[in-house]
Image: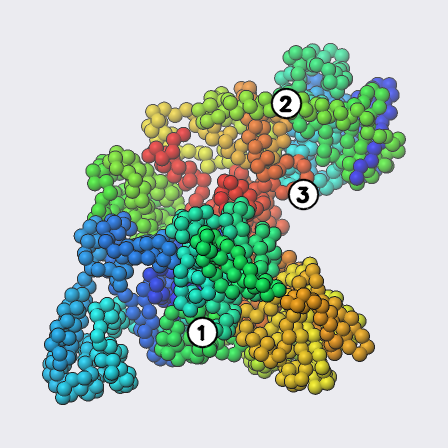
Amino acid sequence: MRRKIGKVLVVGAGIGGIRSALDLAETGYGVTLIDRAEHIGGILSLLDRQFPTDACGMCRMLPLLDRDTSGQYCLRKGLFHENIDLKLSTRLIKMEGEPGRFNVTLSTRRPPIDPDRCQGCGECADVCPVEVPDAFNQGLSKRKAVYLPTPHAVPNPYIIDTEACTLCGECEKVCPTGAISLSDPGRKDFRILVVDDELIVRDSLKDWLEDVGFRVETASSGPEALERLGRDAFDLLLVDIKMPGMDGVEVLRRAREAIPDLTVIMITAYATVDTAVEAMKIGALDYLTKPFNPETLVPMVETVYQERHGPGRETLEVGAVVLACGMTYVDPAEGFGWTGYAGMPDVVTGLELERLLSGTGPTGGRLQRLSDGGPVKRIAWLQCVGSRDHQVDADYCSSICCMISLKEARLVRNRSGGEVETHIFYMDLRTPGKRFQRYGEEAEADGVLLRRVRVHSVVVDEKTGRPRIQFASQDGRLQEETYDLVVLATGARPAVGTGELAGLLGLELNPWGFPLAQGFNPAISGREGVFLSGSFSGPRDIADSVLLAGDAALEASRVIHVAGGWEALEDADEVEYRDVSREKVRTLIAVCRCARELVPEMDTEGLIQELEGDPGVGRVKVVDNMCTAKGWEALVEAAARERPNRVILGACLPYVYARRLKELGKMIRLAPGNMDVVDLRTPLFSVKDPGAARRLTGSELRMALARIRRPGSPVQEEVAVEPRALIVGGGIAGLHAALALADHGYPVEVVEREEALGGNLSWLPRTIEGEEPAEFLKEVQAKVEKHSLIHVHTSSEIVEATGRAGRFRTAIRLADKTRRTVDHAVTILATGGREAEPAGYGYGESDRVLSQKELETSLARGDLDPAVLETVVMIQCAGTRIGTRNYCSRICCPTSIRQALFLKERNPGISVWILYRDMMTPGFLEAGYTRAREAGVHFIRYTPDRKPEVEPGPDKAVVTALEPVLERDVCLRADLVVLAGGVAPQLPGELAGAFGARLDEDGFFEEADSKWRPVDGLREGVFACGLALSPRSVAESVASAGAAADRALRILARETLPAGLVVARVRHALCSRCEQCIEACPFDARYLDPEKGLVVVDAAVCQGCGNCAAVCPNSATVLEGLDDRRMLDSIDAALEAGLMSL
Amino acid sequence: MSQGFKIEVKEGGAECALRDFLEKILNLDEIRAVLTPLRLPYQGAVMPVLVSHGDRLGAAEPLSPAYPLSGARILSRLTRQEAGGRVAAVLRPCEIRAFVELVKLKQASLDNLILIGADCAGAFSNDVYKRAAAEDADGDLARRFRQAAYAGEELPAGYETAPACRVCGHITPDGADVLIGLFGVDADREIWLEARTEVGKALLEGMDLPEGEEPKARSGVIKDRVGKNRERRDEMFHKTREATGGLEKLASYLASCVNCLNCRVACPVCYCRECVFGTDVFEHEPRQYMNWADRKGAVKMPADTVFYHLTRMAHMAASCVGCGQCSNACPNDIPVMDLFCTVAHGVQEGFEYEPGRDVEEPPPLAVFREDEFAEVVGR
């Protein structure tokens, strides 16, 4: 049962957009997902491997619930979901209306190659005479003007780079399926009026535009133009400004009066550019400066045609818009002469290195020097190229580069068996995420050398021609080292077109051009109903992008719900399938006869006869071009006539037919398990012999027959969802999540151990951005308390919990010691964290040594007067990033900076010293670090092997630290020593365990996957947010709460949790209860029912992976739909073709 | 944890002393029954027998060369659920290891159980034992076997221990609570006992036994024997690989298999309630046989013999303890053990898994390690 509950537009199909779209789709929304690129995946499509696994894992984002709505394919290859309409080469060009009811106009470029007809044979590329640098490989290799956008997409039709294409027409001639049509018939209907007093201009414009297929007329004066406009309908007016008599501006004014939506482009000489700009204010779209050539003119007209009048223009009504347009990297070719990038091929960007390491890259994954193809023995990474740099107006940290460089260096080390020397030149190694610290140390253990050195420049080594890095050593002497490759960790920049989009939607941008989030929720943009996802609003790693994507999806859903868009419409197409289990098998096999048969001499008739001889086959029908509308009609007709109880389509790309097959099933009331699509084309690619082709084709069809011949499995019982949420913890994360779910109409029980709600926000006076969390808390708390669907239990604790996603039962001990049992579908653990007690430095021995929180509260209470302080020393990492708490707490560096700035502000004469290991101020927090340095806060770096020493005295505390630049001890006589102890988790293992969740090695919540499922527990239906997850700021906690609520919503929004077609089942009579399957299940979908003594499968949670069936020796556990008999029959059928011989 | 004791052997020899030892155990308050090989009054057959009255222990033959079936399977039946009292079970080393596997597979339990194992000099295959028992006029077979086998004497031709025993690398009862030490001693004078676990220690301490040290010669004897067995084993591996490399050879090796499934019934770690080859999965439709016959021109029936052995190999190779009961059970004398041990050796080496080594060590298929077999699966 599908519910249609509103539509969302997601702009950008990188991982942020994909995740937002998938979450919304899984919750039941219709999603239009667009990307201006020709492929999905964004930057991630270029990267094969991500830490911490140093593998991919994107598929872990695929829907877990009702997974048959989605293609279970590699997400790098493609995205197929019933509720997602994916539109590539598409841009958002207009938005009107109100939140909950926006009208958005999209423009899709008409591809010169029909993707439905392209077979990917590549003959077009063979004949294409144009060669250009391949952008996918970062220009490291060449491609033709007709090319594959990515090496791995499915389907993967060729596309044409219209800018490089010379329209020679060679490809059109050779295309075997006639998929290419370089001329766009729609252009003939696009009428352009060119107005210029000079004949030569008129004629050349007319020629150029008619060459590419537009219909052009001309006028030599203003009055003539107006007369023509009055007579005929035109789509575009190109008008010269400087004309005798009536000038262009006047023509524009009058023309727009008469025809308000006429598109006008001004033609101007250099002298009148200002006038042209003025003209744009009264309605001209753009201007062209003379002299111009067709290369400027044609794309501009093309864009107008595509966006305003092209066939790919459409307007949709959506409830909300999610922006996941990603980010881009700075181009080091301009303005970074010191890196040598522009002149030396062996100086590459991180992305270029990723392509060099990729099996689909220019060298097939072989690392080599780009200058001469020589071996690579030494690589240097230069961090912060275009980040943390005032001179290029980038006073922010790009956040992701340290980890990326570490990963790349580790990959190179491990792949080369430790042969290649890998050096990372850096300022601060920023590892402020979950488990990042350990990853960095592992990289060092793998032999990656970290060099905290400021690089001066990269020059050519005259002797070898290789890049030579010049840097200043500690004592200031210039040193030099030569490398085979130098990799630039280039900084993040706003996505191309961000400014344009911001203008279109009225978004506020930060000083560096990234969209600015509002308040404490990073998903909230300046425009109501428009949300920020992924890394659009600032560089984020995968986990944070995915998390924010969830938050954005949640807010989009909330807006739609608030606007009344939640009314569930039962799917009118709901059908009751025929019970065919007792019928004699009668299969309709439809074999596509392609416009271009691979082996035309194959004896199809003979094969048909042979297949029809099988008692299970009713009819074998040949359908011409099944992929075309006509072909499909023929098939539907045959199916309606024959009423088969099994259907097999022998065609090409199975995913093309997935949706159609479902529709066919609905029409003839045949359940999907009784139908299958077989790719008959791919196996024939390498076959020439007609006999072999026939055997192969026959075998493929027989294998499909074997798969569906046996009656489908009985329908799995669906689990009824108890529409209620339980949230453990009443801090800001818990409360935010509670509100989010209650705002969707679901009752929420909030259990808080303490007497009052609020958690850490009740003592935190302000953030580094200067915002006041207390106010925010008050606001949220007021809403929670007023909300009729939220029940808060303070001074209460969870006693025990049983059950699974959709139906947990939890006992709560309330304040009055009574027990209350709650049934709920989902659990969110928001148990928070606390400041860890700092370790060492005389903490607890002297009043002069405080923790960050103690300083904070003393200042807030007024116990401490900054004016009386002379010197304050802050020591970072007091007990973290080392030993048993080997993780960065992320918030202590910004906190110290904030406190230092506060003290400086209250007492400008105060001397504040921050002793740190690496300043962890990722993203725009970097600006705070800059501000602190400007305000005169002193920073001294220390290393764990030479920690500062604190000698608390009665008068002052003496802090001794090694100043690394001077290489001398400095003694600071401090009034106060403030220790940053970091964040300690407070999620009891027993509590987590009660819900089937686990703790990680640091005691935080263990996510199902650190990158792709950052708020999910290992058991479905259990989520975590806030500090329970890992150290994070207030805004990051709020984002995680939104993400957790979003994941919870997928379950709450359903009445029942359906099982997939392929799902595990236990045949109890055969089961020996060895429980190996329970151990082997990676989704925690099995358990031993102690009362019945049976192994039970939670069919809704089961993902059909088959691990259980693999460990079960006697098939007591079977995978419905893929059981032994089907598999054996399929293998038999395969053997018939001699695919295997036994 | 290990503590030594000894039994001083008097008249009647080691057999008598061990019977007394078992009786003493049975007389302990906390012990409800003893499971031990015991000579039945028929045809000299020796079978595992559950004894709860001491007077029935007179026929116990814990050191008999008979090994009719694996006691691990028998003991699993006794311990799957609460039996209502503590049992002391005398098992061979390979039986103990198989039993540990069954515990991991939740088919048996170590609760309320004391495992007693003796140093093992091997056993006869069933047909040899039957022959020897028929010729054993004075009922003295067990003693004669023990005296010769433990002394390391060459056994008479036709009366060698079973092939599995001759290649065995685990001749001491590693997983036992109580070890009966027979290597390196004259068992007609003294038997060494060792408590190997807390449970074993508590048991022996309650029996008022004199303390004893491990016989000096014991470890040397064990090393020697295992060394010889290893040599024979490697030779067997080599021969078996030669004989079974490739499907053709394998089919020839297994040619006389009639799909009786006896080997799987005899296998102590083949724990399925019903073998998949007995279920509907292999209940082929008649037309299927016709198809096969059509395709190949002829189809051998039963059709799934090689497939059956391959499947059993896939299922049991990790847990195979090399007891040899499969060969023992084969009506057509297929050297099943040689094949299974050879395959199991590779599998166990690959997973760094040793069946029966430790009850806490999970079976390889229940464990997922991301980084294993990189040379096969890539990285």
Q: CA distance from mark 2 to mark 3?
A: 30 Å
- Label 3: which secondary element: loop
Q: CA distance from mark 2 to mark 1?
A: 73 Å
Residue A432 point in image, percent of width and height: 58, 65
- Look at mark 2 in the image and give the residue it sits on: B231
User: Could you tell me which residue is drawn at 21 percent across and 69 percent down?
Assistant: A294
User: Could you tell me which residue is drawn at 66 percent across and 82 percent down?
Assistant: A903
What is the quadrant of residue B13 in the picture?
A: top right
Instruction: Tell whether A73 sits left or right of B17.
Output: left
Residue A927 point in image, percent of width and height: 54, 75
**In this view, the mark in front (2 or 3):** 2
To the question of a shared chain for discs 2 and 3, the answer is yes
- Can the viewer see residue B35 in this picture? no
User: Could you tell me which residue is drawn at 39 percent across and 44 percent down?
Assistant: A711
- Look at mark 3 in the image and give the residue it sits on: B360
Q: Between residues A641 and B201, which one lies in front from this camera angle? A: B201
**In this view, the mark in front (2 or 1):** 1
